[in-house]
Image (spheres, rainbow, N blue to C red):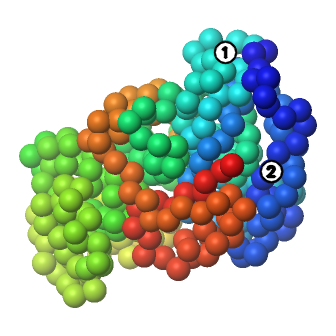
């Protein structure tokens, strides 16, 4: 195993929790450095992204049906998205070396029970989930990208895997975007602001829906039209769209069916609670979702776009790792513009 000589031998700082609950259960404390398994790399984390699943796990996945709630062992470390520098490589790893700057979404959804462990100074990552960090952006912006950008990419461009879809009986299929009209609800949020950019880059006409304070941002990211949902309901004014990506999702996604043309598609990023299947069939609209999955090859494909600024991560706020609870409090207040990130070390 190749190892960074400067790496501490046994312990690191990490944010752990010993029970489910609110942000106050997050503790900044000593923890063992992960031991590498064959095919993994150890990354010295410089920044970690904060995503909605982190809060779901912290709270015990109470929003999921009981049969979907994973069994968890405490203490656990939250987080999936990291950017950092390779500190060690295990046997069988040839694509990365000590000192490489990398980024990744770690073990998702396989780490739903706390096996991702990104809120820490070090994290072990399967090499297949790692990509070289875009050289044109810093670690904070790189850590902001993986889960949200992979979600946008796997919904809109390519799944990147053949795993069964846990959300529906059929495989999710992206639709052609060039020359199409795409409505993006939640366009300023973590996933939404990447959906706007990917759709625009693929040649779509983008209608962005968000609160008014986000208009300048989403127009700068490429939106052709903007709807302030606090003043106008998009489903009251939009008709004949080709695709709606509802980055908010949930039971209210059904209201967007009326904005679509026959043959159009609705992609709710959070599909639980959607009850518009009969109306969708009546209107000739496809409703489809997918579960984002770790994919180092896709992150490598996306790196040049991030490096060139063609796609960029917007930072809502950046907090020290020790203040992870404050980052979760910020997420709980909602109306996040882009991504929340933890600076590590």
Q: Residue at x 13, y 66 (%)?
A: 225
Is residue 108 visible to the viewer in this orientation of the structure? no
Q: Position of residue 61 (x, y in %)?
A: 68, 66
Mark 2 closeness class: few <14, some 14–19, many ≥20 residues within 10 Å: some
84 or 67, nearer to the observer: 84
Q: Position of residue 161 (x, y in %)?
A: 48, 31
Mark 1 closeness class: few <14, some 14–19, many ≥20 residues within 10 Å: some
Q: Residue at x 87, y 49 (%)?
A: 31
Quadrant position of residue 278: bottom left
Q: How many marks?
A: 2
Point out which mark residue 93 bears.
1
- As drawn, 168 above or below 185: above
323 or 126, nearer to the observer: 323
Is residue 23 visible to the viewer in this orientation of the structure? yes
Q: Which residue is mark 2?
A: 13
Q: Residue furthest right?
A: 10
Q: Residue at x 68, y 58 (%)?
A: 321
Q: Position of residue 114 (x, y in %)?
A: 74, 51
Q: Of marks 2 and 1, which one's residue comes earlier in the chain? A: 2
Q: Position of residue 287 (x, y in %)?
A: 33, 57
> What kind of element bears circle 1?
loop
Q: CA distance from mark 2 to mark 1?
A: 26 Å
64 or 213, nearer to the observer: 213
Quadrant position of residue 228: bottom left
């Amino acid at each position: 195993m190749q190892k960074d000589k400067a790496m501490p031998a046994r312990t690191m700082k990490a944010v752990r929790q010993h029970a489910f609950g609110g942000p106050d259960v997050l503790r900044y404390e000593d923890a063992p450095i992960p031991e590498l398994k064959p095919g993994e790399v150890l990354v010295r984390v410089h920044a970690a992204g904060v995503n909605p699943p982190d809060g779901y796990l912290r709270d015990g996945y109470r929003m999921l049906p009981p049969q979907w709630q994973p069994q968890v062992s405490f203490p656990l470390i939250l987080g999936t998205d990291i950017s950092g520098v390779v500190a060690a490589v295990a046997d069988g790893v040839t694509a990365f070396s000590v000192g490489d700057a990398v980024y990744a979404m770690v073990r998702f959804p396989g780490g739903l029970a706390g096996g991702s462990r990104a809120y820490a100074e070090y994290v072990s990552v399967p090499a297949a989930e790692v990509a070289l960090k875009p050289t044109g952006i810093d670690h904070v912006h790189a850590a902001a990208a993986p889960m949200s950008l992979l979600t946008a990419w796997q919904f809109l461009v390519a799944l990147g895997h053949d795993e069964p879809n846990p959300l529906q009986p059929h495989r999710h299929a992206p639709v052609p975007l060039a020359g199409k009209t795409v409505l993006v609800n939640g366009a300023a949020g973590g996933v939404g602001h990447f959906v706007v950019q990917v759709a625009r880059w693929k040649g779509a006409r983008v209608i962005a829906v968000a609160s008014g304070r986000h208009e300048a941002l989403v127009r700068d990211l490429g939106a052709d039209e903007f709807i302030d949902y606090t003043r106008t309901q998009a489903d009251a004014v939009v008709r004949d769209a080709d695709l709606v990506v509802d980055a908010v999702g949930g039971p209210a996604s059904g209201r967007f069916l009326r904005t679509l043309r026959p043959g159009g598609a609705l992609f709710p990023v959070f599909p639980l609670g959607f009850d518009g299947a009969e109306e969708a069939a009546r209107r000739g609209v496809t409703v489809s979702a997918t579960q984002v999955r770790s994919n180092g090859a896709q992150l490598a494909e996306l790196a040049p776009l991030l490096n060139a600024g063609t796609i960029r991560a917007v930072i809502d706020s950046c907090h020290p790792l020790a203040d992870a609870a404050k980052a979760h409090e910020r997420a709980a207040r909602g109306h996040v513009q882009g991504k929340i990130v933890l600076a590590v070390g």
